[in-house]
Amino acid sequence: MTDFTSAGGEAVELRRGQSLLTVDRKTRRRNAAEGRFKVYGLIAISIALVMLVILLVTIVVRGIPAFTQTFVSLDVPLRAEVLDPDGTGDPEVIRGVMTFGYAPLIEEALADAVAETGVQTEIDAAALVQMLSSGVAADIRDRVQENPELVGETVTIEVLASSRADGYFKGRVTRESLERDRNLSPAHLDVLDAMRDAGIVSIHFNWDFVWGADASESRPEEAGIGVAMIGSFFMMLVVLVLSLPIGVAASIYLEEFAPKNRFTDLIEVNISNLAAVPSIVFGILGLAAFIQFAGLPQSAPLVGGLVLTLMTLPTIIISTRASLKAVPPSIRDAALGVGASKMQSVFHHVLPLAMPGILTGTIIGLAQALGETAPLLLIGMVGFIASNRPDGLAEGLLSPNSAMPAQIYEWAKRADPAYYERAWGGIIVLLLFLLAMNLIAILLRRRFERRW
Amino acid sequence: MYDAKLDERVTTMDDIKISARGVQVWYGDTHAIKDVDVDIADRTVTAFIGPSGCGKSTFLRCLNRMNDTIDSARVEGTILLDDENIYDKRVDPVQLRAKVGMVFQKPNPFPKSIYDNVAYGPRIHGLARNKAELDDIVEKALRRAALWNEAKDRLQAPGTGLSGGQQQRLCIARAVATEPEVLLMDEPCSALDPIATAQVEELIDELRENFSVVIVTHSMQQAARVSQRTAFFHLGNLVEYDVTDRIFTNPSDPRTESYISGRIG
């Protein structure tokens, strides 16, 4: 771009005696080249910004609907003759009633609610229930089992609408798309509209998406990312606890103590290479080493954490070494000059100064690990956990679990478009986590930053 | 040239602090110091002068084994500090450096408070039993470095916030706080303005009361002003070593004369 020979073989103009008020050709050409370069730069930045805006807008527009859900408010008559025919009040008897027993009660409550709106419909009560989530009976049963005294009363319960009904209000499902749908017919939509007008159906924020567990293929309205969040949290814990001390200790040794010879050069080259190894390779290594050889359980956050530790270590070592290198040697000399040992000079002076860089590198490594999917697929960190209640299934480092990116991948794979929406919603949660981690990195940097 | 000399004190070579014999230094294949013999007297300022790259700083760094931190550096010969060879296998360089303090070319205070800068050495060597003793040590060191009056009201302020000259005096205070016997100074004034330089030079002359001071300098005027003995290094050789007055008035080696009169260097 910049050439030192004058182009076109023209003679170099004499500078002596030339006026400064007129710009000579060569200068003009140089200025033009500089101007062009600035324009290229601006174009590059604009393209990058536009891409970023497109990305963020798409994620937000597609993901936000996942956070709201359509609910139907029903007055469910919890009839004693169905749930507790002998009037024992014994929780054991009530537990004996399966979800099947609740179905007629829900049908009745829904038929009443529809009748209340005054809308005329030919759909029978059994088909109307298609508007509700198939998990409603189980939810109500759980609730009754928790409070057996509810039996015999009529309680107002807000239940989930089915994903088709939910999709209709979000614009995902239209009358045309329902023509060939087995679950919901266009006639249902008239009923739904009437219920919406009557205030029986409402759309509001759904915390169960954030804290809840995954649900089966046919019930996307019940699925949440909460359990995967727990899995990711445990993995990050393992990664932090293992990779920070190991990475920092390795970097300090290599940077400050290790002799410079062929062997340490080899280690250095290999660490840089490891940072570029595809993550799926670490996944298969983890499968072979931790699960097949060491016999650790599959789908466990501990194994996921170990694999991600292997993946994060090179990042942490490289960034830690860079921040150790950035500490001026005069500080080391100063410490050695007053008779500090090598270790004292490192731990009293060099390490505190390198701290902001080390922490930033660690958090960036963690953020990278948080978003990693491929190795998790290989070690089975895609456990399907439909409920984390009542016994805290996903609590612990060894119990099977999933992770946020793996959960998003699972959702994106499923056929129902409602799951596609949830995948985008999951990406928003993941991005919020990454944002929070980067914020922590910036704050720590500010906190530890010192001038020298 | 030496009319600005602070005062005249007779020095003798009766009391030899450091005695170097046959010192050779290699950096990889480069022969940086060639067979240097020097005796450095106690309670005297000894100046090392010479053109850039002549090995004077390298030789200075041999005296407290700072060259050990450079992997490629190799030192041969003997350097006796109070008749003990500091390159003996049994000598721990950390212990040696507590005895032979060093002040560097660029002021390099720790990014900590003024107090912590001075107290660092005494703390790691366990020179104070309690806070009061440490306070005394810090005050004494700052007074010796002629920084007490400026710093006493802001001991907790960061040392890096001081001016260049103050920072260098802080580094001197930090070095003397560990009560070394020898103080090595590697061009301590090269990053300072003339006023700060004058203050540091005055300080060096006062430090001679208690320490043996070895100073590397590029400024011949400075060598003439502050030192009692001067060594002239050239291309890794010690060309001439004598009383400062004689070096600057009547050098015996033509190379010294050329350097002092500005013909080489």
Image: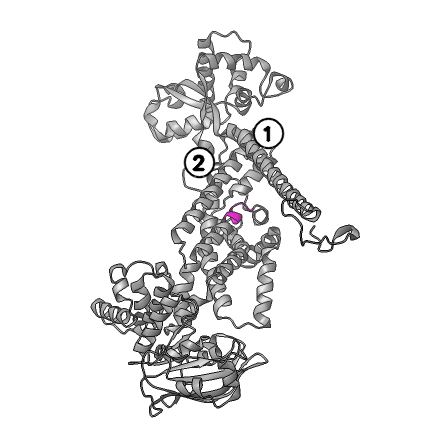
Residue A156 sits above or below residue A118 on the image: below
Q: Which of marks 1 and 2 is nearer the N terminus?
A: 2
Residue B124 part of the magenta segment: no
Give me the disc on residue B250. none
Residue A396 in sight in this render:
no
Helix or strand or loop: what does disc 2 sit on?
helix
Circle 2 crowding by C-alpha within 10 Å: few under 14, some 14–19, many from 20: some
Amino acid type of the residue that numbered disc 1 sits on in the rendered structure: Asp
Where does the magenta region start and end?
A367-372
Picture coordinates of residue A72, whole percent (x, y): 45, 20
Amino acid type of the residue that numbered disc 2 sits on in the rendered structure: Trp
Picture coordinates of residue A335, whole percent (x, y): 39, 69
Helix or strand or loop: what does disc 1 sit on?
loop
Q: Which of A364 and A38 is in front in this view?
A: A38
Q: Which residue is found at the position 46% from the left and 80% from the top? A: B49
Residue A369 part of the magenta segment: yes
Quick one: which residue is furthest to the front in this view?
A17
Quick one: which residue is furthest to the left in this view?
B132
Residue at numbered disc 2:
A211
**Quadrant position of residue B139:** bottom left
Answer with left or right where residue A206 lies relative to residue B6.
right
Q: How many marks?
A: 2
Q: Nearer the viewer, residue A129 or A345?
A: A345
Residue at numbered disc 1:
A416
Q: Is disc 1 in the same subunit as disc 2?
A: yes
Residue B196 sits above or below residue A66 on the image: below
Main secondary structure type of the part rendered in magenta: helix
Picture coordinates of residue A443, whole percent (x, y): 41, 47
Residue B66 sits above or below residue A368 on the image: below
